[in-house]
Image (cartoon, grey):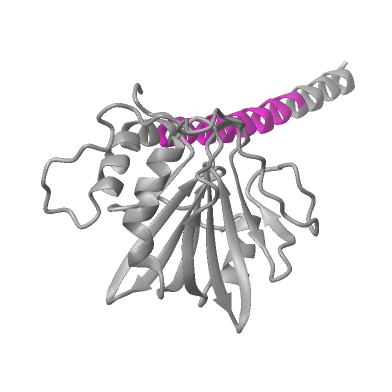
Amino acid sequence: YCGAMALTAEEIRQVVAEIAPALEGGWVQKIYQPHDEAISIEVRSQGKTLTLHISADPETARLHFLGRKHPNPQTPPPFCQLLRAHMEGARIEHLRQIDDDRIVRLDMTHDGQPVTLVAELTGRTANIMLLDQAGAVRGQLRKGRFKTGETYIAPMAKARPAGAQFIAPRPGVMNHAPTSESFPISAELERRFQKRDEARARARQREAIKSALRKKLKRAVKRVEALESDLARAERYRT
């Protein structure tokens, strides 16, 4: 799907500026992991329930609010279970972009202790990590450059000439006509990625069906082989 590319640093700056005021002071209600490369955080804030979607998909790494629900697996994956244990019931203190880079920190307080979620929306190396109060990595969505227990250090921002912009915004990407939407940047990003997400979801569903069929076929072949073996034995006894 053309146009579905990981967010630039400038786009991340704009979406964070839009959604941070709505999230800060809110409470994490529920966390979901719709698939291997994304999480959704349900937040109750200012009388509303908001869903923050963070994707570490190498091709479409991003964050924004969701206007529609994504299907979730019946059993939460291990990383989702870890986040639920350490983040549900947490108060959101800050959401901020780090060093004008494609890195976002969600700082929270859980049971009186600081806990942080870091989203590195850096394309091929994109990842989401949970940090404890000492800044050590408690867990991560994808296998990354840190082991559990190591202290998190943000990657160095790419060197750039003095006065140059880190990543030039794409022309017109975030130019909005007046809209009645509360979060127009989020809504635009959700629309931008919707087709690709739906195509990926269909592909995952097809793979799951194929995998189930392959297992059934394997079992059926084994049954046929066992029956043929029994038949061959029966033939030997008869002769």
For image coordinates 71% across by 42% down, the residue present is 144
Left or right side of 146 for 74: left
Q: Is residue 226 above or below residue 93?
A: above
The percent position of residue 44, horizontal first and vertical second, equals 36, 73
Left or right side of 107 for 40: left
- Does residue 161 appear in this view? yes
For image coordinates 38% across by 40% down, the residue present is 11
For this rendering, which residue is in front, 104 or 129?
A: 104
Q: Is residue 136 above or below residue 122?
A: below
Badge count: 0
Q: Quadrant of residue 109?
A: bottom right
| Magenta-colored span | 201-225
For image coordinates 25% across by 54% down, the residue present is 183
Q: Is residue 89 magenta?
A: no
Left or right side of 14 for 143: right
The percent position of residue 61, horizontal first and vertical second, equals 49, 38
Q: Quadrant of the C terminus?
A: top right
The percent position of residue 161, horizontal first and vertical second, equals 55, 28
Left or right side of 107 for 238: right
- Does residue 70 appear in this view? no
Q: Residue furthest front?
A: 162
For this rendering, which residue is in front, 96 or 179?
A: 96
Q: Is residue 217 magenta?
A: yes
The chief SS type of the magenta part is: helix
For image coordinates 61% across by 54% down, the residue present is 77
Q: Quadrant of the N terminus?
A: top left
Q: Is residue 152 above or below residue 168?
A: below
For this rendering, which residue is in front, 239 or 66?
A: 66
Q: Quadrant of residue 130?
A: bottom right
The percent position of residue 173, horizontal first and vertical second, equals 28, 32
